[in-house]
Amino acid sequence: MSKTTIAGRELRSLSREKTIVLALLIQLVIAGFSSFLVVGLTSLYEPGAAADDVIVGATGEETDALVEAAGEVDGLVVRPYDDRSEARAAFEDNRVQATAHVERAEGRIAVRIEAPQASVQKTFIVVQLRAALETLERNERADRSEYLSVLPLSVPPSVDASPYFGFSYTVLVPLLVFLPVFISGAVVVDSLTEEIERGTLELLRVTPASLLDIVDGKAGVMAVLTPLQVVLWLALLAINDIAIANVAPILAIATSFAALAVVFAAALAVAIPVRQRAQLTYSFGMLAAFAAVALLPEHPATSIALFAINSPTTTTYAHLAGYCLVAVAAVVAFRWWIGTLDAESLG
C-alpha cells in the first residue's frame, strides 16, 4: 500500500466526519455570502456603520467647537441648548440620545458626556462621539499651531475609510485563511490517534507501507487540502466584490502554517497516542502559538491583510520567507524523526 493509497483512504474518510463537514460548510457560507455577512458583522465590529443619526444635546461655552467637529462625522448631529437642565429634559424625553457639556478649563476644552445605560445603544453613541472628539482635537491642534515657537508636524488630513473595507481585510480574509490551518492539524491528530487506539495501524504495517508512508499519506492530504480550501474561499470573496491581491504569497503563508500545524499535530499523535489528550494538547498548543506570534514585528494576520490589499512591506516579505523556511525545516526534521521510529513503539 503506497502513501497515495493511504491519502486516498484518508480523503474518503473525511466525508464521514460530520464535525469536519460542518466546519467546511460554515467556511463556505462565510466566503460565499460574505457581502451579506460583512454588513451585519461590521455593525458589531464598528457599530457606527449601520445605524441612524445620533442626536446629542450640547451646552457650554465651547458648544460651537463641538458642533463644527460633529459636522465632519457622518451620523452625528449636535444640537445646542442654552443650559444643562434644558438639555437634560430633552434627554429624558428621548429627543436627544445623549448630552455633552463643553467648557474651557485651564486652557483646555473639557467635555462631560451623559449617555444611556443600555449597552448596545451606549456603544454606538460612544463610537460616534469619539469620532467627533478626535476631530475636535485635530481642529484645536491646527488652530493653535500658529502660536507655537516651534512648528509641530503637520496634521495629516482625515480619511473617510469604509468600515466594511477594514473588516473585510483585517478580520474576514485572515479568518478564512487560518481556519483551514487549524482544522487540518485537528484532523491529523484525530486520524492518527484513532488508528493507534483501534489497532488498525498494525494492519497497515502488514502492507509494504512504512510508518513514514502512513504518516505522509495522512498528514500530506491535509497539508494539500488547506491551500486548496484557501483558493476556494478567496475566489468566493472575489465573486462577492472583495478583491484579493497577491494570492500566491497568501497561499504560501497558508501552506507554511498548514505544514507547521500538521507536523505539530502528527508529532503529538505519535508522542501522545490517546485521542482526547492529544486533541486537548493540540488545542492548547495552537492557542499558545497564536499568542507567541503576536510578539513578531508583524502578525501573520497583518501580513495576510497587507498582501490582500497589495500593500506589502519589506518586513512582510521577510516574514513570508521566514515562515517558508521554518515550515521546510520542520517537515524535514519531522520526517527524519518518524523514519527512525519503530511502529511497535506506538502501541
Image (cartoon, rainbow, N blue to C red):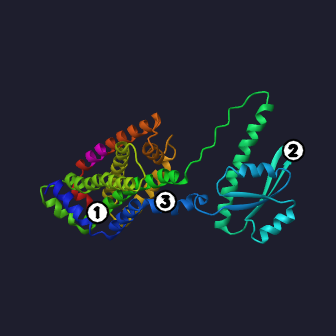
Q: Residues within 10 Å of mark 1 (few under 14, many from 20)?
A: some
Dominant secondary structure of the magenta stretch?
helix
Instruction: Count the numbered circles shown.
Output: 3
Q: Is residue 197 magenta?
A: no
**Quarter residue 123 falls in:** bottom right
Residue extent of the magenta highlight:
331-337
Label 3 and label 1: CA atoms lie apart by 35 Å
**Residue picked out by circle 3:** 38
Position in image of residue 32 (x %, y %)? 38, 61
Q: Residues within 10 Å of mark 2 (few under 14, many from 20)?
A: few
Q: Amino acid at mark 2?
A: Glu
- Number of the label disc, if any, that sits on residue 191: 1
Is the residue 339 above or below the residue 94 in the image? Answer: above
- Number of the label disc, if any, that sits on residue 35: none
Q: Secondary structure at mark 3?
A: helix
The answer to whether residue 203 is left or right of residue 286 is left
Label 2 vs label 1, nearer the camera: 2
Is the residue 143 above or below the residue 195 in the image? Answer: above
Residue at x 37%, y 66% (from the top left corner): 276
Residue at x 64%, y 39% (from the top left corner): 157
Q: Amino acid at mark 1?
A: Ser
Judged from this view, the residue extending furthest toward the top is 150
- First along the sequence among labels 3 and 2: 3
- Number of the label disc, if any, that sits on residue 106: 2
The answer to whether residue 269 is left or right of residue 41 is left
- First along the sequence among labels 2 and 1: 2
Label 3 vs label 1, nearer the camera: 3
Label 3 and label 2: CA atoms lie apart by 45 Å
Label 3 vs label 2, nearer the camera: 3
